[in-house]
């Protein structure tokens, strides 16, 4: 019997194996591909270049953040403003730069992007309240629910139109639903203001997740079975 071939790892796999032993990819229903002389995984050179670029940007962010702190300390301003660029650079790095290191990882980092964006908005709101005695709460009441709502709609649309990674999108939607639920509890217990943005975010997350689970029930069951047998 002709051996199978894993396109992800570029290795030949025995015909009686249903999953690649290196990456775990399901090979049972895969069409036969011509086998080459390659008997070991080929590392993608573009991933090395992306890693070097990410490392360069990370080092640049560290240098710029340290420079902001140094300037703030040397000139001894009454306002400790350096935390704004430091925290902003940290969040922007985890939201936009770090996922670039692995090709296609942006799709797996949507919940991480939403979380760090929300934390950045809450920090700005809280630090403004601490420094300038502004009214705290606009981030919890309006900004963060809007961010979660936007990412929730994006994740569920991707899940509906995609033929792959359904399980990944559903898990992301579940995390966003959990974030919305935590935000609802925080808003209801500790922060005054309008409740409708948080309620809208929570209801949208719950409704879209329920619709996706019903619409893609069979595909999700097959994906779950594959993950169990991997």
Image (cartoon, grey):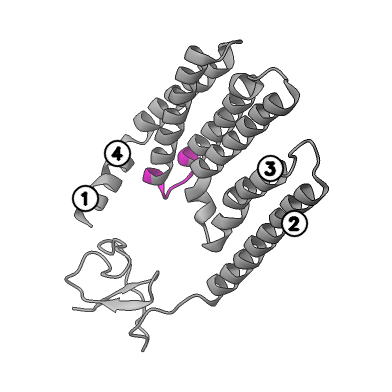
* Separation of marks 1 and 4 at Cα, in angstroms: 15 Å
Q: Circle 2 sits on which residue?
A: 67
Q: Circle 3 sits on which residue?
A: 83
Q: Position of residue 172 (x, y in %)?
A: 43, 40
Find residue 120 and report its image quarter: top right
* Separation of marks 1 and 3 at Cα, in angstroms: 45 Å
Identify the residue at image location x=61%, y=64%: 54
Q: Circle 1 sits on which residue?
A: 228
Question: Neighbour class for label 3 at 10 Å: few (<14), some, many (≥20)?
Answer: some
Q: Position of residue 227 (x, y in %)?
A: 26, 51
Earlier sequence position, callout 4 versus callout 3? 3
The reply to whether the magenta stretch includes residue 55 is no
Q: Secondary structure at mark 4?
A: helix
From this view, report whether residue 195 is shown above or below residue 220: above
* Separation of marks 4 and 2 at Cα, in angstroms: 54 Å
Question: Neighbour class for label 1 at 10 Å: few (<14), some, many (≥20)?
Answer: few
Q: Secondary structure at mark 3?
A: helix
């Amino acid at each position: 019997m002709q051996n199978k071939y894993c396109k992800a790892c570029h290795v030949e796999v025995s015909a009686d194996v249903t999953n690649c032993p290196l990456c775990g990819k399901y090979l049972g229903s895969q069409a036969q591909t011509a086998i080459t002389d390659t008997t070991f995984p080929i590392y993608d050179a573009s991933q090395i270049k992306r890693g070097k670029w990410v490392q360069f940007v990370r080092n640049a962010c560290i240098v710029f953040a340290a420079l902001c702190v140094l300037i703030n300390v040397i000139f001894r301003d009454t306002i400790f403003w350096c935390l704004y660029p430091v925290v902003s650079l940290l969040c922007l790095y985890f939201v936009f730069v770090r996922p670039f290191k692995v090709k296609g990882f942006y799709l797996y980092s949507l919940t991480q992007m939403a979380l760090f964006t929300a934390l950045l908005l809450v920090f700005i709101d809280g630090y403004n309240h601490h420094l300038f005695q502004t009214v705290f709460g606009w981030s919890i009441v309006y900004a963060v629910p809007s961010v979660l709502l936007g990412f929730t709609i994006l994740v569920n649309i991707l899940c509906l139109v995609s033929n792959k990674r359904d399980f990944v999108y559903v898990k992301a939607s579940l995390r966003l639903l959990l974030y919305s639920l935590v935000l609802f509890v925080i808003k209801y217990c500790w922060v005054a203001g309008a409740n409708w943005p948080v309620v809208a975010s929570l209801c949208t997350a719950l409704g879209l997740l329920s619709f996706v689970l019903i619409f893609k029930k069979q595909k999700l069951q097959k994906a779950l079975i594959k993950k169990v047998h991997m």
